[in-house]
């Protein structure tokens, strides 16, 4: 039965991606099959052994240390306000972008970042059928985060056409940053966090290959920009510090607008129809919850959690899941936990648009143009990860 449901889920997910494909005849099936096979193999290993847990915890621990260093600067400027909890999201989530931006700038300046881009891009592009920059960006998104990653490729942004920018943004929205893995692991079982991280990396490539297929020539695959005038070290520091601050401010502004708008829609919907927009979407998501392996008696509850993530963010949904975990089977908890570990939600459209706009206004406007399609693709990535988890549990 699990295998039948998994096949049904694949058909539905791939069909939903196919319906919005920009070039249905250009879809490359070989890399999709290879990456699906890799997903199945890695999911089996991660969900049935302890392999990878120590490595992921080590990476998460490293970023926790970096965030602690960032907190030193934040506390100095804001007088310990963050420690008192007066503005935790702005100070503890957005402001560290400035420090991460500095580290990215240093890595760029000493020529380490271009080497990493070339290495990761070369290896993954042999598997996914996409460009080297797209391949690098997917891994970088899982390290830097969905807003910071664009700082690491800011030199390439002006040269990217819409279809390549879409793939980069899909990777950013489908993955999660290593800096918050520790926080996720306190809310859901660590093995599900790790599984989602790995599955979403390849899932982003799979869905992008269906929705957004294209060929990248060697001339187009710009992964390093040679600047005519060399900056001094402190000029570079100033540039990346200001870039990080600008991204943080714009992301914050976008979040205020998006979250407020969604809250208004939720309340208006409840006033008119008697149920919240999230609950209504729970019924919409119920069939999807069923095909990814959630037992029929729990699909509405699971669908509501999935809808909560879509409308708000993964943290809110994880907290809601924790409240009803006792009433759900371990199978449902595992499937939904993997689904929740990504940035695929409405507010992320604002975050990614703001991050790109802060670095290149023209490209930021382009991202806003395909924002809903971006969320659509990233949600399919989460569904694919959940379906694979349902097969393995």
Image (cartoon, rainbow, N blue to C red):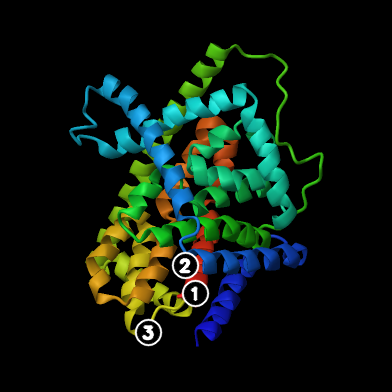
Q: Which residue is mark 3?
A: 296
Q: Tag 3's secondary structure? A: helix
CB-based contact (under 8 Å), mark 2 and mark 1: yes
Residue 70 seen by the camera: yes
Mark 1, other Cα within 10 Å: few <14 / some 14–19 / many ≥20: many
Question: Which residue is nearer to you in this view: 114 or 95?
Answer: 114
The numbered disc on residue 392 is 1
Q: What is the quadrant of residue 189 in the picture?
A: bottom left
Q: Residue at x 56, y 42 (%)?
A: 140
What quarter of the picture does the C terminus occupy?
A: bottom left
In this rendering, position of residue 230 left or right of residue 248: right
Instruction: Classify 42 as above or below 238.
Output: below
Point out residue 253 in the picture as x, y percentages from the top left corner. Answer: 37, 37
In this rendering, position of residue 279 left or right of residue 114: left
> Mark 2 vs mark 1: which is more N-terminal?
2
> Mark 1 vs mark 3: which is more N-terminal?
3
Point out residue 341 in the picture as x, y percentages from the top left corner. Answer: 42, 57
Q: Tag 1's secondary structure? A: helix
Residue at the limit of the structure toward the bottom, as seen here? 1
Q: Residue at x 42, y 32 (%)?
A: 97
Q: Which residue is mark 2?
A: 47
Point out residue 119 in the picture as x, y percentages from the top left corner. Answer: 69, 40
Alpha carbons under labels 1 and 3: distance apart? 18 Å
Point out residue 284 in the picture as x, y percentages from the top left corner. Answer: 40, 74
Alpha carbons under labels 2 and 1: distance apart? 7 Å
> Mark 3 vs mark 2: which is more N-terminal?
2
Mark 2, other Cα within 10 Å: few <14 / some 14–19 / many ≥20: some
Instruction: Classify 154 as above or below 187.
Output: above
Q: Residue at x 55, y 37 (%)?
A: 150
Q: Nearer the viewer, mark 1 or mark 3?
A: 1
């Amino acid at each position: 039965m699990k295998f039948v449901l998994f096949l049904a889920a694949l058909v539905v997910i791939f069909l939903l991606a196919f319906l919005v494909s920009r070039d249905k005849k250009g879809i490359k099936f070989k890399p999709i099959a290879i990456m699906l096979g890799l997903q199945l193999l890695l999911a089996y290993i991660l969900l049935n052994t302890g392999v990878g847990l120590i490595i992921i915890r080590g990476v998460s621990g490293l970023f926790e240390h970096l965030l602690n260093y960032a907190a030193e600067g934040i506390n100095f400027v804001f007088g310990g306000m963050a420690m008192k909890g007066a503005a935790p999201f702005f100070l503890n989530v957005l402001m560290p972008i400035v420090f991460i931006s500095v580290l990215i700038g240093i890595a760029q300046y000493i020529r380490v970042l271009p080497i990493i881009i070339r290495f990761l891009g070369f290896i993954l592009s042999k598997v996914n059928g996409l460009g080297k920059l797209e391949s690098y960006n997917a891994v970088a998104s899982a390290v830097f985060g969905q807003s910071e990653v664009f700082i690491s490729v800011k030199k390439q942004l002006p040269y990217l056409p819409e279809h390549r920018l879409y793939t980069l943004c899909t990777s950013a929205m489908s993955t999660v940053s290593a800096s918050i893995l520790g926080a996720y692991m306190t809310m859901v079982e660590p093995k599900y966090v790790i599984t989602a991280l790995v599955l979403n990396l390849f899932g982003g490539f799979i869905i992008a290959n269906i929705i957004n297929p294209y060929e990248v020539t060697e001339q187009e695959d710009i992964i390093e920009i040679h600047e005519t005038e060399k900056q001094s070290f402190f000029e570079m520091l100033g540039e990346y510090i200001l870039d990080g601050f600008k991204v943080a401010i714009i992301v914050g502004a976008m979040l205020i607008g998006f979250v407020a708008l969604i809250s208004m829609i939720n309340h208006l919907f409840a006033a008119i129809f008697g149920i919240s927009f999230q609950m209504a979407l729970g019924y919409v998501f119920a069939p999807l919850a069923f095909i990814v392996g959630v037992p029929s008696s729990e699909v509405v509850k699971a669908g509501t959690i999935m809808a909560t993530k879509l409308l708000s963010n993964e943290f809110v949904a994880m907290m809601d899941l924790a409240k009803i975990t006792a009433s759900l089977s371990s199978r449902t908890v595992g499937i939904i936990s993997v689904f929740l570990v990504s940035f695929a939600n409405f507010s992320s459209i604002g975050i990614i648009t703001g991050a790109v706009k802060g670095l290149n206004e023209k490209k930021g406007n382009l991202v806003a143009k395909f924002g809903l399609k971006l969320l659509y693709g990233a949600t399919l990535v989460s569904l694919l990860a959940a379906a694979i988890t349902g097969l393995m549990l």
